[in-house]
Amino acid sequence: MKILDMPCVKGFIQLAQDGVDKGWHEMNGGNLSYRLTGMEKANVKKEVKKPQKEWIDICESVPKLAGEFFIVTRTTGYMRNVMRTPESAFGIVEIDSTGTKFRIWWGLVDGGRPTSEFPSHLKNHEVKFLQDPNNRVIYHAHPVNLIAMTFIVPLKAKDFTLALWQIMTECPVIFPKGIGVVPWMVPGKGEIASATSKLMEEYDIVVWAHHGLFCAGTTFDRAFGLMDTVEKSADIFMKVAATQKKRLSTITKKDIAKIAKEFNLVNLRKQFLR
């Protein structure tokens, strides 16, 4: 099967375009990665025949991902070009046997390299892979209202989670484990990659204060759906906050407990209701 005809590649392109249509990807903002299945990896090898010879340092160590293949967006590339010029806007890369280097199999033409936040993606992928091998998608975007919230809500998981759970009924159902929060840090590798992956051990959604949001999912639909739900809830939150009036009503902690019981949300983070 041709690379661009692979369902996972089509799904990758569609998610990127959906994020663009939502207005979450100004300039070269945001990035996306997907870990291929064994069959998908075999198809890439059959179709491409051989990779580039050069192995490139990841600047992080992800030994549990040794030998894995990823689709990943390009550094300095525009998400809006993923659908327009796919061979330039993203690529397929292989992680070496040590988990410290990668090489390109397809795409990223004209000297392209994976997103500068590829180390953060890989650290998150490693955590999620160990939790469940079906976790394959890491999506980072810059949703406007979510970023605005980081200026007025305490940068703590409990405060952020409750702010969203109490503003829209579906939120406790869609992300019962809550949301982790990383304080502002320089993006890329190192400190922020480690901080994010640490929180991914507990959450599927992690806020980067004054920057954006990371979501992990088993499918493209799941990852996009988490991003979309959080941003819609944040939109409502910011509109209510803009009134500068005391709320006449809200979804209470007791109400959230009722939702958890009704929907059998055994993984709801109940300590956030205390």
Image (spheres, rainbow, N blue to C red):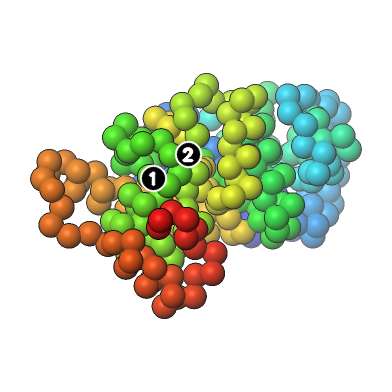
**Residue 102 shown left or right of residue 267 in the figure:** right
Q: Give coordinates of residue 189: x percent, y percent.
A: 63, 26
Judging depth in this view, the residue of 231 and 170 nearest the camera is 170
Can the viewer see residue 12 in this picture? no
Direction bottom: furthest residue: 262
For marks 2 and 1, give the CA distance: 8 Å
Q: Give coordinates of residue 83: x percent, y percent.
A: 51, 45
Residue at the location (40% across, 56% down)?
Answer: 274
- Residue 128, above or below 181: below
Q: Secondary structure at mark 1?
A: helix
Residue at the location (19% across, 43% down)?
Answer: 241
Judging depth in this view, the residue of 28 and 240 nearest the camera is 240
Residue assigned mark 2: 181
Can the viewer see residue 65 in this picture? yes
Labels 2 and 1: the sequence-earlier one:
1
Query: Quarter-wise, where is residue 248 in the image?
Result: bottom left
> Residues at badges 2 and 1 in contact (C-beta under 8 Å)?
yes
Q: Give coordinates of residue 5: x percent, y percent.
A: 65, 56
Quadrant (top left, top right, bottom left, bottom right) of the N terminus: bottom right
Amino acid at the residue labelled 2: Val
Residue at the location (87% across, 34% down)?
Answer: 98
Residue assigned mark 1: 160
Amino acid at the residue labelled 1: Phe
Q: Estimate how packed mark 2 is, as few (under 14), some (14 to 19) or many (20 or more) residues with alpha carbons within 10 Å.
A: many
- Residue 263, above or below 111: below
- Residue 43, above or below 56: below
Circle number at residue 265: none
Q: Secondary structure at mark 2?
A: strand
